[in-house]
Image (cartoon, helix red, strand yellow):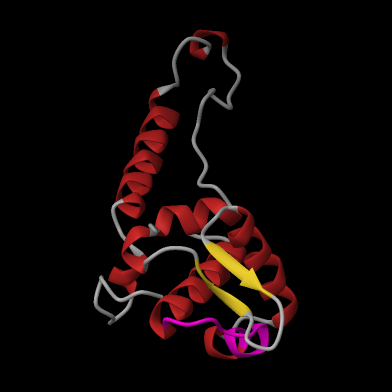
Amino acid sequence: MFSQTAEYALRAAVVLAEQGRALSAAELARLSEVPPPYLFKVMGQLVRAGVATAQRGKNGGYRLSRLPADITVLEVVNAVDPLPRIRHCPLGKPEHERALCPLHHQLDVTYAQIETTLGSRSLSEMTDIPANRIS
């Protein structure tokens, strides 16, 4: 269902939520089992999206920008590989210009349901940590 990029971003975000502290890139790559070159890519995207922060230096590393309870799974996924939505019927039929055909309408309804579900689930729900622990 998710791209490899989204999967890696979710792994890294969940590890950061579980650890509750800044992690070096090497440690985060090891704990999340994300290849280091890919980790740099996804963490850069998470930082730009405001999901995570990065600090250089001896005590630096990556950490979540907010409590895990305040970051949704959808935020993480959309930061790296937004979920698709169907806005126009890909079949290109003239009779489908004003509205999606039944097939693509139902597919878009399904995408919307997935979006709603992921938007209602926090990172803290993906871990065993209490929802109010500061990361």
Q: Position of residue 25 (x, y in %)?
A: 66, 82
Residue 68 appears in which quarter of the rendering? bottom left
Q: 113 or 105: which is nearer to us?
A: 113
Q: Is residue 60 left or right of residue 121?
A: right
Residue at 43%, 85% in the rendered image: 19
| Rendered position, 48 above or below 27 | above
Q: Position of residue 118 (x, y in %)?
A: 35, 54
Q: 3 or 54: which is nearer to us?
A: 54
Q: Position of residue 84 (x, y in %)?
A: 52, 42
Q: 121 or 115: which is nearer to us?
A: 121
Residue 50 appears in which quarter of the rendering? bottom right
| Rendered position, 19 above or below 1 | below
Magenta-colored span: 20-29
| Rendered position, 93 above or below 75 | above
Q: How many marks?
A: 0
| Rendered position, 98 above or below 133 | above
Residue at 71%, 72% in the rendered image: 40
Q: Position of residue 126 (x, y in %)?
A: 33, 72
Q: Is residue 111 magenta?
A: no
Q: Is residue 50 left or right of residue 35?
A: left
User: Which quadrant: the C terminus?
Assistant: bottom left
Residue at 71%, 66% in the rendered image: 41
Residue at 41%, 37% in the rendered image: 107
